Image (cartoon, rainbow, N blue to C red):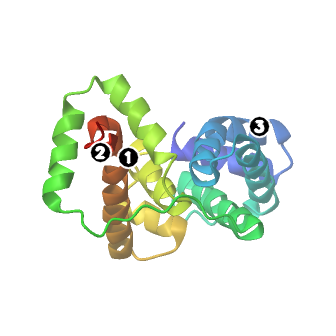
Amino acid sequence: MTINDENILIEAVNNGNTKAYAQLVDRYKDLVYTLALRMLKHKEEAEEVAQDTFIKVFKSLDNFKGDSKFSTWIYKVAYNTCLDTIKKNKKHHNNVAIDEYTFNKLDTIDNALDNIIKEEKSVLIKNCINKLPEDSSALLTLFYFEELSLDEISKIINIEANTVKVKLFRARKKLAVILEQYLQPQNNMSYGKG
């Protein structure tokens, strides 16, 4: 679907065409759900947030001015809806200490991952991303899996692109901590027992 096609659909929705809205929902439902699941870590909550997101999009579609891509705007609505849910539930997911991580450790993790089959790597990374705090999960999902630019992510989460870059780097370091546990299980063994 091109930007022009989306604009035609948006105009049709604004003129009361519900089938056009169903097409927009169909196009973005998986992306919105994936982002919500990464942030909330709970299937039912992610489904609720996805529904809430599309209700908000429908109610405020006439506010979409086309300053950014429509997908960016939907992501922003989804991201903010997730944040509202997190604040409402006052959830705090796993926080990972990153104090002692260096560039060398990141390189080691990246090299180890290069040796894993692509599909296995994708599953492994998704599982590890699910163990991160919601903001880190969202950033990594938007950047690596949805392949959004720093500028697009900046518009979605409403912070400067340079700050997104820093947060993305920190999220990668947290991910490296978790990945290392998966890739080097012998580190978790207790030595000296005998």
Kindly identify the residue that appears in the image at 13 percent across and 56 percent down: 104
Q: Quadrant of residue 93?
A: bottom right
Q: Closer to the N terminus: mark 1 or mark 3?
A: 3
Viewer-side residue, 143 vs 185? 185
Is 84 left or right of 69, judged from the image as shown?
right
Question: Label 2 is placed on what type of residue?
Answer: Glu
Helix, strand, or loop for circle 3? helix
Position in image of residue 15 (x %, y %):
83, 51
Kindly identify the residue that appears in the image at 77 percent across and 68 percent down: 88
Distance from the alpha carbon under mark 3 to that under mark 2: 43 Å
What residue is disc 2 on?
180
Q: Badge 2: how crowded within 10 Å, few (<14), some, or many (20+)?
A: some
Kindly identify the residue that appears in the image at 65 percent across and 43 percent down: 33
Viewer-side residue, 59 vs 177? 177
Question: Label 1 is placed on what type of residue?
Answer: Tyr
Is 181 left or right of 133, judged from the image as shown?
left
- 119, above or below 68, in the image: above
Viewer-side residue, 95 vs 17? 95
Q: Do the residues under discs 3 and 2 have CB atoms within 8 angstroms?
A: no
